[in-house]
Image: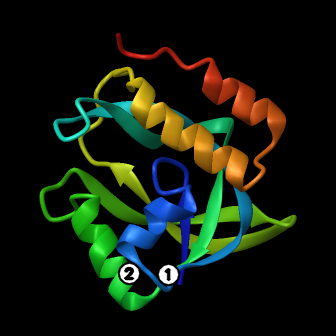
Amino acid sequence: MFYFAYGSNMPTHQILRSDSYAKFVGKAELTDYKLDFTRFSSKRKCGVADVVKLVGGSVWGVLWEVSEAGWRCLDIREGVSSNSYRRISVTVLYNGVETKCFTYEVVKKKPFIPPNQMYMDLLLEGSREHELPDDYIAKLSRITIAT
């Protein structure tokens, strides 16, 4: 099953923490959504990434092939049982082809909560590692950081 990672699970070293068998499929675009930071993570001490529906919006990320064991671990790490995130089915554009996959969205969304530099560095690292579009990486680099 495919997983669309748009946040801290984009870098290879991060996804391998949940699934040592995860395989990189490619970069992909989730249309009609926007990237936002709608949840405060007490672990990270900052706002963390979310996808929010927005007609005409676009979120770039990484498509991973994840094992069943990997999904169980991701569900735990993303806080599915505590209602932090829920796994949802979405369709992304991968090499111009609509591709079904799963991703996570925040359950109880709050207004924008700034991420910290350490968290944003993970998003930028994954974006650069997997060669997401330059304009998207530039957009990420302009996100307001918590001080």
Query: Where is residue 5 drawn, in percent x and y?
Result: 53, 58
Residues marked 1 and 2 touching at CB (< 8 Å): yes
Q: Which quadrant of the figure has residue 37?
A: top left
Residue at far top of view:
147
Residue 24 relative to residue 107: left or right: right
> How many labels sit on residues?
2
> Who's the residue at 63% across and 67% down the image?
63
Q: Is residue 115 above or below residue 73?
A: above
Q: Secondary structure at mark 1?
A: loop
Q: Mark 1 and mark 2: span between their CA atoms? A: 6 Å
Q: Is residue 79 left or right of residue 101?
A: left
At 66% from the left and 46% from the top, the residue drawn is 127
In the displayed structure, would residue 71 be above or below residue 141? below
Q: Bin the neighbour count of mark 2 within 10 Å (Cα to Cα): few under 14, some 14-19, many 20 and up.
A: some
Which quadrant of the figure has residue 123?
Answer: top right
Q: Which residue type carries mark 2?
A: Gly
Q: Residues within 10 Å of mark 1 (few under 14, many from 20)?
A: many
Q: Give the residue pinned by disc 2.
A: 70
Q: Write the residue at 36% across / 79% down.
A: 71
Label 2: which secondary element: helix
Residue at the spot of label 1: 66
